[in-house]
Amino acid sequence: MLTKIKLTFHNLGLRSWIECDLCYNCPLSRAKGCCTYNPTFHVVDIAYIGAKRPDLLLLIINRPRVLVETTWISVNYLDDPMVGHRCQFNTDTGCSLPVEFRESVCRHFICPGIKMWEEESISQWAGFIQELETTEAEFNQHLREKLKQAGVDLRSSFLKATAVLVKEYKEVLKKIEEERFAGYPRQEQVILEREISLSEKWVV
């Protein structure tokens, strides 16, 4: 039996995300869905979170089993006796991080099982995601260079490094980001019809 799946593309520049209503009823027969991931926040994520929610950034780095490297932060998953292990931000009601503050994979991942990119109707969004990945890589490199020039890094001088990242994001990168993605719709919904199997065999 075919199931209707609603995808919503949200254009928020580098904080863009894809919403899928299938996630609310995950086909996998396990509690955690696909959230076994260790989210990794790169400098462009840290710059944005630091500019908008510095309190949230402190919450992230004070998590257990967090790894702070020179230009990125990884929050390792925790062991869970019920499901093996799960992401620290995964709760019974979904991710505890507001969506715009999640890292890139968490904002864009959609199960391969729904074969999203086979739909011609969303071809412009394939181009959008490609542009997004290119811009994110470019901005990450730019911000890493700024940290190097300032002689600071996240591991040895977290607050000073964050200040450098936030300043550069506000004064330089935010305007470039807005201009680069202005040609795409702010939001678009697409309905797919797919055969869904509720089992561990579901492709994620």
Image (cartoon, grey):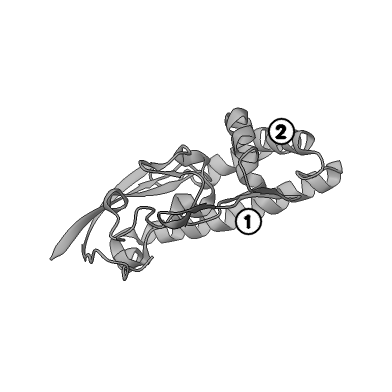
The picture quadrant where one finds residue 133 is bottom right
The percent coordinates of residue 153 (x first, y second) are 79, 45
The percent coordinates of residue 201 (x first, y second) are 31, 71
The picture quadrant where one finds residue 197 is bottom left
Outermost residue on the front side: it is 81
The percent coordinates of residue 119 (x first, y second) are 29, 65
Disc 1 marks which residue?
137
Q: What element carries label 2?
A: helix
Task: Identify the amino acid type marked 1.
Answer: Ala
Task: Identify the amino acid type marked 2.
Answer: Lys
Disc 2 marks which residue?
167
**Point 35% across, 43% down: residue:** 187
The picture quadrant where one finds residue 192 is bottom left
**Point 43% across, 47% down: residue:** 17
The percent coordinates of residue 136 (x first, y second) are 59, 52
Measure how far apart labels 1 and 2 are at the Cα level. 19 Å
**Point 71% across, 39% down: residue:** 165
Q: What element carries label 1?
A: helix
Q: How busy is the neighbourhood of tag 1: few (under 14 within 10 Å), some, or many (20 plus)?
A: some
